Image: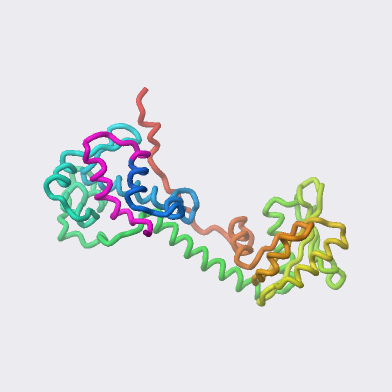
Amino acid sequence: MAIPDFQSTMLPLLQFLSDGNEHSNRDILDALENQFDMTEEEQHRLLPSGKQRIFVNRLAWAKSHLKQAGLIASRKRGYFIITDRGMHIISEEKPDAIGINFLMQYPDYVAFRQGKKNGENAPTQESDQSISCEQENTPEEDIERGLSAITEGLKQEIMASILGCSYRFFEQLVIDLLLAMGYGGSRKEAGMLTRKGSDEGIDGIINEDKLGLDTIYVQAKKWTHTVSRPEIQKFSGALQGKRAKKGIYITTSQFSKEAYAFTQNIESKIILIDGDRLAELMIEHHVGVTIVQTFHIQKIDTDYFIEA
């Protein structure tokens, strides 16, 4: 089955805690992973940032919502227990599901959803038109999906800009990117463009490290069509002519499957970077882009609140 959204985990979570005992986050995770019958791949699938498992993130938000509604409590770090209100729901009301819409019957939860402080009048469910009860994604997922959309748009802009520039500019861009990634020391010391027309299949030369202990040869193709195996074979031959064992082939388009397969069966180490990966690296290393706004997402420091 697919990874359940965070609202779908609320009732199973409350049912698991209905034995009245305190349970650790680890126990809760193990129990619900087994209950939802997810594949191993689904259990370990990560958020776009790659920093947290999707199911773990959704389960954490389910705990947060149930806690704000007063259905569960956390009396010590990393442990949860059902409350009297939560026990009443399980034993008396016996709902088929629990989600945001269900929790909206509790004024303190409505206040939490609207950002009301303690003591302020909490609106009723009927008067609250700003809350979506059909929400499936957690806030982190929404943020990361939005960031991914922005990044994809930026990548398209980068590619359009590159394709509008000269071949010589693109070759220099490639050297600038490799320097920004930590190769060599400076443009003057580490990156050098070969003379046009006499490069023998080599567009750039760059030191692998700041001391210049090894040299990497670069080929840069501002193309819109697929780079096939014969092109990579030519580059491999150019490396052999230089007695070089390392090369980077960068294109604004893409490589064929045969091109990738060829690089796996030769002595020289050739890294292939297509247009999509090129744009990603430019964004990551701030080449040709600028930061216009930053956000800091914070979470509670539970260690701070532990009294000695």
Q: Nearer the viewer, residue 257 or 194?
A: 257
Answer yes or no: is residue 175 visible.
Answer: no
Q: Is residue 206 above or below residue 276?
A: above
> Which color mode does the image show?
rainbow
Looking at the image, which residue is at 73% across and 62% down?
263
Residue 221: image location, x then y, percent: 72, 71
Looking at the image, which residue is at 83% across and 71% down?
196
> Which part of the image, by quadrant, shows the N terminus?
bottom left
* Magenta span: 1-27
Which image quadrant is residue 177 in?
Answer: bottom right
Left or right: where does residue 100 sit relative to residue 163? left
Q: Nearer the viewer, residue 200 or 86?
A: 86
> Which part of the image, by quadrant, shows the C terminus?
top left
Q: Number of marks in the image? A: 0
Left or right: where does residue 268 sit relative to residue 129? right
Q: Is residue 134 above or below residue 55?
A: below
Residue 269: image location, x then y, percent: 75, 57
Residue 193: image location, x then y, percent: 80, 63
Which image quadrant is residue 133 in?
Answer: bottom left
Answer yes or no: is residue 183 visible.
Answer: yes
Q: Is residue 17 magenta?
A: yes
Residue 246: image location, x then y, percent: 78, 56
Q: Nearer the viewer, residue 27 or 302?
A: 27
| Residue at the left extreme, as displayed | 92
Q: Is residue 206 magenta?
A: no
Left or right: where does residue 218 sit relative to residue 37? right
Q: Is residue 157 above or below residue 122?
A: below
